[in-house]
Image (cartoon, rainbow, N blue to C red):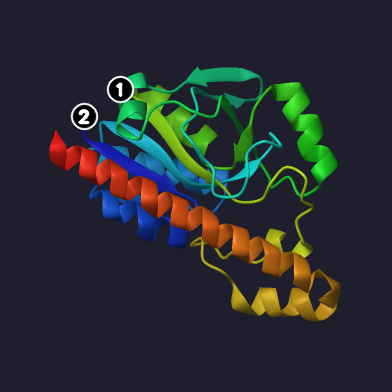
Amino acid sequence: MKPAVVTGLTAEAHIAKLLGWPVAAGGGMPWGAEQAAERLVAEGATALVSFGLAGGLDPDFRPGAIIVPIAVVEAGRIRPTNAALSDRLGGWFGGMLHAGSEIVARADAKAALAKSTLCGAIDLESGAVARVAERHGIPFAVLRAICDPAERNLPPAALATLNANGAIAVGALAVSILARPWQIPGLIALGRDAARARRALVGRVDQIRLLGSVL
């Protein structure tokens, strides 16, 4: 098995590279993740991992919680993750992950989605990674850290400040803040929780590397 990793954001890709596996960032949208996954398979990957941050749907999942879901749910279809690959990532935990097509910003929408899908978290890349893996007949798994908890409404700037490469578009962020200064406390809280989630990912990557050296 020659795993490769798909992330949404460049910051996530920097962490994933510590695994020593090929990594490609998809820009934070499903179509970009699909292109990144196809590119990695063309370059020789025989397994795919969706890696990075996720939004919480289960209120019990706090910022920084690590999830390795048993399946990805997209448009009502359940695609199970690979047990052996998930074991390499620390073992299954976190139930199922919903593959979204757009960021779910409001707490009431998160609650409705949790109820309708029975999923504990949501991201925008894992569905695309699962589809590419299925298309090529190779295993896939997911390693994510919760960033925004289920009860939080995301500030508007969080929805419109990524560029095509999955990096923060500073200009767009500044414009959004100037137009809606009331969102600054929410952005500070989101930044704090994102930092906690990234630290959790680094910690899990260190565990995976240590396990690999022992084996």
Q: Nearer the viewer, residue 151 or 158?
A: 151
Say which amino acid is labelled 2: Met
Q: Distance between the residues labelled 2 and 1?
A: 10 Å
Percent from the top left, x then y, of residue 108?
85, 40
Q: In which quarter of the image is residue 150?
A: top right
Q: Describe the element under mark 2 as helix, strand or loop.
A: loop
Q: Could you tell whether 74 is left or right of 208 in the image?
A: right
Which quadrant does the N terminus fall into? top left
Label 2–label 1 contact, CB within 8 A:
yes
Q: Residue at x 48, y 22 (%)?
A: 70
- Relative to 209, is 171 above or below? below
Q: Nearer the viewer, residue 179 or 198?
A: 198
From what the image shows, is residue 77 above or below residue 10?
Answer: above
Q: Is residue 27 visible?
A: no
Which amino acid is tagged 1?
A: Ala
- Give the residue drawn at x 14%, y 38%: 214
Q: How crowded is mark 1: few (under 14 residues within 10 Å), some or many (20 or more)?
A: some
Which disc number belongs to residue 43?
none
Q: Which residue is drawn at 39% across and 56% down?
A: 13
- Residue at position x 56%, y 69% from top? 168
Q: Residue 54 at what x, y percent from top left?
A: 58, 45
Percent from the top left, x then y, of residue 8?
50, 51
Quadrant of residue 174 within the rendered picture: bottom right
Q: Mark 2 points at which residue?
A: 1
SS state under label 1:
helix
Image quarter where the C terminus lies is top left
Q: Is residue 103 visible?
A: yes
State which tag comes first along the sequence, 2 or 1: 2
Which label sits in the foreground, 2 or 1?
1
The mark total stands at 2
Q: Position of residue 98 (x, y in %)?
A: 62, 31
**Residue placed under numbered mark 1 in the picture:** 84
